[in-house]
Amino acid sequence: MSGIIRRYRPFFNIDDSFPIVTLHEGNTPLIPAPAVAKATGVSGLEVHLKFEGLNPTGSFKDRGMTFAVSRAKHLGATHLICASTGNTSASAAAYGARASIETLIILPQGKVALGKLSQAVLYGAKIVEIEGNFDQALDMVRIIGQAPGVEIVNSINPYRIEGQKTGAFEVCDQLGGKAPDFHFIPVGNAGNITAYWRGYKEYQQAGKIPTLPKMFGYEAEGSAAIVRGHKIENPETFATAIRIGNPASWEPAVQAASESQGRIDSVTDDEIAAAYKLLAGAEGIFCEPASAASVAGLIKASRQGLVPENSVITCVLTGNGLKDPDSAIRLGEASKITLPPEAPKIADYLGLALS
Ligand code: AN7
């Protein structure tokens, strides 16, 4: 089945007149991660990575965007609008192009990774950069989005969360009809943790899985509003996707953590960077920095003794590493030199013996 709406149709309250705008999102792989399991220091862990970076625009946002943009089309919207740290805007612009609806984007100037910006530009969105952060951009969208014909496609649009809940369905299907024991996920605006928790609960109610996971969400330490219990005026982190100081889905995220006996905690930029490099260098998986917060969270929780031996773990990798080439080049360790096109010199540098 192509795309998450058709694939999980019985879990959506729509009828046959609902137009489906899809780029065949979803159906992303759940990849075993033995090196991550080893790095936790806890024996017998089964770690799986839900690699959402393999969605059509390279992030999990496509699951919610297919539904929100389909809904906008159903309503006859003339414009989509969103604030974004980058991925939402790339996804909105793509689905907007697909639906022939003009897409308007408000971004925090200088804080959107290059790959994301390049997507929005080529998909043909109208882009405004503000001298401010994501939270201020979202404040603008809440006001400007009231204009006639305009649909807000940030996760304050309930159709976004509805679509994103399918990530949980897929994890359970891929685990053979069960939920993991623990679900680790980055937290920015807190929509995705809300969506996964809803998805797990609906799957249990439908009799598809016997148990629910503990939801462990991770903010970046410099942007950890939920952990600190107050808004952060000037959020900071190199994981720009989650550089958010006033999460829109704050309460439902706290509820997901408490209902599931999980937690919302934070990880430092150093912990995020270490996980980012571990995933690339030891698993061969290139995710963007914010995504690595889930794995950084797993490692932190393991060291805190919160993860029992032999647990089944899912970490969501929310976005593709190609989104943010600058971070990769800045943090990457491979040495690079320039040499003349002479085989002996190159072999010598590479440490290879030529007979
Ligand atoms: C890669 O694109 O908020 O907690 O405007 O891009 O559901 O917000 C992105 C968020 C995690 C956090 N990982 O998810 C945006 C935006 C990546 C992200 C998050 C984002 P939420």
Image (tube, grey):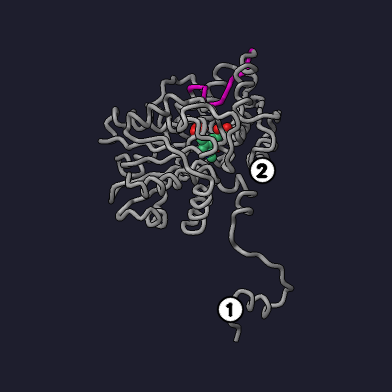
Tag 1 residue: 352
Query: The magenta stretch spans which residues?
Result: 148-158
**Please, is residue 333 above or below residue 106 in the view?**
below
Is residue 63 in view from this perspective?
no
Tag 2 residue: 114
Which residue ends up furthest to the top in the rendered image? 148
Callout 1 amino acid: Leu
- Circles 1 and 2, Cβ within 8 Å, touching? The answer is no
Q: For the point 51% across and 34% down, which residue is it?
A: 188
For numbered disc 1, what is the local secondary structure? loop
Which residue ends up furthest to the bottom in the rendered image? 355
> Label 2 neighbourhood size at 10 Å, few (<14), some (14-19), many (20+)?
some
- Left or right: where 181 falls relative to 244: left
- Point out which mark residue 294 bears: none
Q: For the point 66% across and 28% down, which residue is it?
A: 106
Give the percent coordinates (x, y) of residue 193: 43, 33
Screen quadrant of the N terminus: top left
Is residue 137 in view from this perspective?
yes
Q: Disc 1 to disc 2, how far (Cα)? A: 37 Å
**Please, is residue 99 above or below residue 295 in the view?**
above
Callout 2 amino acid: Leu
For numbered disc 2, what is the local secondary structure? helix
Near-viewer residue (325 or 102) = 325
Cβ of mark 2 under 8 Å from ligand 1: the answer is no
Q: Predominant secondary structure in magenta?
A: loop
- Left or right: where 77 falls relative to 214: right
Q: For the point 43% across and 24% down, which residue is it?
A: 251
Give the percent coordinates (x, y) of residue 20: 51, 27
